[in-house]
Amino acid sequence: MSSATRLGFWSAVLTAIFAAAAFVVGVASPVRSGPFCASACITYPYTNGGAAFVPIDYIWMYPGVLLAMIFVVLMACIHYYASDDKKVFSQIGLSFALIYSVVILVDYFIQLAVMQPSFLNGETVGLSLFSIGNPHGIFIGLEDIGYLMMSVAFLFIAAVFAGRERLERSLRWLLAGSSVVAIGSLIVLSLVYGYNLEYRFEVTVLTINWITLIVSGALLSLLFKRAAESSNRR
């Protein structure tokens, strides 16, 4: 098994694991404000009782940080796997993956390394825009654009899998389909809710992308394993 296919296999497996972990913990985390908050909701300035929500509201970000890093590795391995005439698409996909990774790492590290200790020490002045509970805040804006860039990466990476084998066809339709649905949902939700978009697109795109990563991670691990076995037989 070559270094690229071995790395591709394990990065695909880890992508599925980290996406599943983030998805499960994220779904289990209570919503504190916005349209999906059912009870005990916080209001402006969205820093009320912030210390009480540490670390429970932030646990899902830890697998999210790992996912942001391993996803770039996976995209690089796909770029290596792509045939010469498809490498332009994999290169573009990798570029959008890097944008996603940088945005999400900055976004999540602000929450983990700045917001948590600030809340615990009662240093809440000026934190309203950065609060995870602010449905119109910087955290949501960065997360929206970050995962939107991941969706765009899916669209270009899908073009790499142009083969007629069932596995490649499944990957192509899964990645392209999820990208179209994610981008389309932003357009539809923006038209319906306008400036009151709040958490609606974030919840939608996270759900679509995490499920896509879980399924595609499993499929890609099979693809890289098959590629390694084929290489060993030569």
Image (cartoon, grey):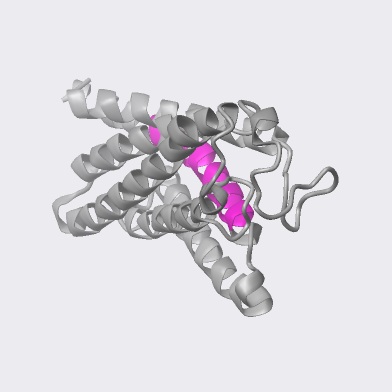
Residue 20 in sight from this viewpoint? no
What range of the chain is rendered magenta? 202-221
Judging depth in this view, the residue of 195 and 202 nearest the camera is 195
Question: Which quadrant of the figure contains the N terminus?
Answer: top left
Q: Toward the viewer: 33 or 217?
A: 33
Residue at 78% x, 49% y: name it. Answer: 37
**Residue 233 sits above or below residue 224 on the image:** above
Q: Is residue 155 above or below residue 222?
A: below
Viewed as shown, does residue 85 lie left or right of 100?
left
Image spot of residue 75 (x, y percent)? 30, 42
Left or right position of 26 against 62: right
The quadrant of the image that shows the C terminus is top left
x, y percent for residue 210 = 54, 43
199 or 84, nearer to the observer: 199
Q: Quadrant of residue 65?
A: top left
Q: Position of residue 206 (x, y in %)?
A: 56, 49
Residue furthest toward the right? Answer: 39
- What residue do we see at 64% from left, 44% from top? 47
Looking at the image, which residue is at 45% across and 59% down? 176
Determine if the magenta segment contains residue 49: no
Residue shown at the point (56%, 41%) measured from the top left = 124
